[in-house]
Amino acid sequence: MKNMRDFVLGFFMLAGLCCVLALPRVVMIALPRSFQMGAYLGVFVLLLGLVARDQRRDRQALDRIGAWVSAGGWISVPAGRSWPWESLLRTRGTVTVKWAWQSLVDGLLITVGEAKWDDNALDGAVVGWAGKGVFVEVQLPVATEPMGIRRPHRTIGTSHRLDLPALHDAFENGEIPPFTTRDRSLFTFEAFEGRLSPASFDRLIERTLRIVRLLDLGPDTVRDH
């Protein structure tokens, strides 16, 4: 992490100096030498401040997620473990999990985490071909037949559960994300720009549990909020 911060700091310092050097020559010539040196120093200090601000915001975001993990009783799980979507990925695409946690929510074992993907690896499960975001995996009480809904609105599988009008209405209204089931797993992804927050995890957990309820795949403890 420290090496990454040093790299980012060095990058922005170099970019700032390049910008100053690229100023129109007529402006630099017109300024006294002391003013020129002040301009260099001002840009340097500005860039340092911007990098420090971003680093502070990154730490604050991680602190908020850490507090959310502790309060919810979430337990860290290895990011390199096997995931239910691995055998379903498109040939060239990859999904890389950055970190993940597990906990019981409404009587179901749920895994949440942050991931990034490329080359349309998720094939309609998210908007765009590449990006980053959050994922939720729900361990179902019993295995179910393979099925899912992908963007823009296409079904995968032949399960009778896919015929439920309420399921398709919820998808069309943006109340649930695309999803996939495989054996005892139901998983979803949601692209997210910027810094992650506890709200981004809570949102996808709630939307994924809505799918479980609509498909009638969970225990009686999965309540309709």
Image (cartoon, rainbow, N blue to C red):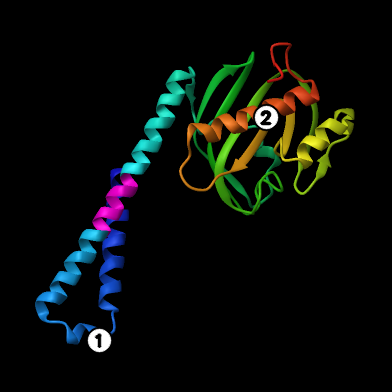
Secondary structure of the residue carrying tag 2 is: helix
| Rendered residue at 26%/74% (across/down) | 20
Q: Position of residue 134 (x, y in %)?
A: 56, 38
Q: Is residue 65 above or below residue 133?
A: above
Q: Position of residue 147 (x, y in %)?
A: 80, 34
Q: Which residue is mark 1?
A: 25
Among numbered discs 2 and 1, the one appearing first in the sequence: 1
| Rendered residue at 25%/86% (across/down) | 25
Residue 61 drawn in magenta:
no
In the image as oriented, which residue stretches furthest toward the top? 220
- Identity, as a three-letter code, of the amino acid under mark 2: Thr
Q: Is residue 216 above or below residue 155?
A: above
| Rendered residue at 55%/32% (across/down) | 201
Magenta residues: mostly which secondary structure? Answer: helix
Q: Is residue 204 above or below residue 152?
A: above
Q: Position of residue 169 (x, y in %)?
A: 82, 37
Quarter of the image with the C terminus in it: top right
Q: Position of residue 161 (x, y in %)?
A: 86, 28
* Relative horizontal placement of residue 171, taking residue 57 as reference (left or right): right
- Identity, as a three-letter code, of the amino acid under mark 1: Arg
Q: Magenta part of the protein: which range?
A: 47-55
Quarter of the image with the N terminus in it: top left
Regarding residue 190, the answer to whether it shows in the image is: yes
Q: Work out whether residue 100 or residue 37 is closer to the camera in this orientation and state it.
A: 37
| Rendered residue at 59%/32% (across/down) | 203
Q: Which residue is mark 2?
A: 208
Q: CA distance from mark 2 to mark 1?
A: 58 Å
Secondary structure of the residue carrying tag 1 is: helix
